[in-house]
Amino acid sequence: MSHRLARRTFFQAAGAFTLAPSTVPALAGAAAEARDWPPAEGPGTPKLCLGVGANAEAKELRRIRQIGIEHVLMGGPAIPWQQADLRSLVERFKAAGLTVANLMIAGFPKALYGRPGRDEEIDAVIASIRAAGQAGIPVVEYNFYAHRLVEGYYEETGRAGAGLTAYGYDRAKDLPPLSEEGVHGLDEMWANVTYFLKAVVPAAEKAGVRLALHPSDPPVPLSRGSAQIMATLAGWKRLVGIVDSPANGITYDCGVTRELGEDPVAVCRWFGERDRINHVHYRNVRVRRPSLDYTEVFPDEGQVDLFAVMRELVRQKYPRALYPEHPRALDIDREQPGFHPYYPGGGEYAGLVYNVAYAKAMLQAALSL
């Protein structure tokens, strides 16, 4: 029998099977249950977003829109922010079909370390939050590290030579303190963040802005001699209890949650049911020793059940931004001029396309249940 005849026989048999009477009721039932597809992001669903520079060129914004992203986040200008500047920023991105969903605030080291002059810095933070609210920016994200021990990152080789980002606390745990930072104990850092939040959260409430504190990443116990308030799940829970308000929330990072050795779905449920998730980072890891030794991997190969996480967020009707971050290093990115990712083993646009496609598939699947 020729190859062409074999193909014809196969398709004839397949057609006969498809139209067999016994299958007609099943097909009719499937048609009756048909629904609109694809399920769309709406007021009560997560909003996929990407990070972008505030001065990104039009071509970069176009690339973001091409892969189905409508929300962005970025670092904010120097504090205090001005309403006119933020409105201009929001309008520029709006013209490109993008909504600014989150602005990162920084520049308050005296408040962080409890030094003289912190009240003036806090006043600048409050003015910035008011400006964000007036400009229609719903979330302001921040960090509260005494030091972030990024010195422990290194590149690991993944499938077919792709770059992965590994972390080893043993590589950096004995590094000395930095003179400009000093050494800060856990009680001191809790006192500093409590002072900060009691001043800032009421202003955020009035401005209609939610605050999102990112957990310590890496979540190591000591960072150049200083303790970290957000390096444990107990710390995350304590943080949101300092001022009992939805404006006082966290960036829920399912990758960091797993790095701690915690259950990402259970943690998501605890914070989500209390309305304390104000931003989401969505990524995967393989952990060897919780908090100390792990590797950030592709979203499809780690220990986090990312579909279960997405399903939980959809169940909660979580309505804010979700960032499929930390792209892996792919050759097509490495070959581009000027390739220089922030993290060893990290990638750029092609890696982000992979992350976005995976996250969008998880979101559509969760919304279709």
Image (spheres, rainbow, N blue to C red):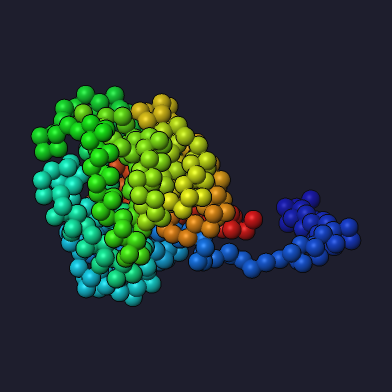
Q: Hey, which quadrant is residue 52 in on the image?
A: bottom left
Horizontally, is 233 left or right of 150 in the view?
right
Look at the image and tell me in which quarter the C terminus lies. Answer: bottom right
Horizontally, is 129 left or right of 273 in the view?
left
Residue at the image point whose x is 20% and y is 33% from the top: 184
* Front in this rendered view, residue 228 or 189: 189
Determine if residue 163 is in view: no
Q: Hey, which quadrant is residue 227 in on the image?
A: top left
Residue at the image point whose x is 14% and y is 34% from the top: 182
Q: Hey, which quadrant is residue 204 in on the image?
A: bottom left
Q: Position of residue 190 (x, y in %)?
A: 27, 39
Residue at the image point whose x is 41% and y is 66% from the top: 70
Horizontally, is 120 left or right of 307 in the view?
left
Residue at the image point whose x is 26% and y is 44% from the top: 193
Q: Position of residue 80 (x, y in %)?
A: 17, 61
* Front in this rendered view, residue 233 or 75: 233
* Front in this rendered view, residue 252 or 305: 252
- Depicted 345 relative to depicted 28: above or below: above
Q: Residue furthest right?
A: 21
- Depicted 304 relative to depicted 59: above or below: above
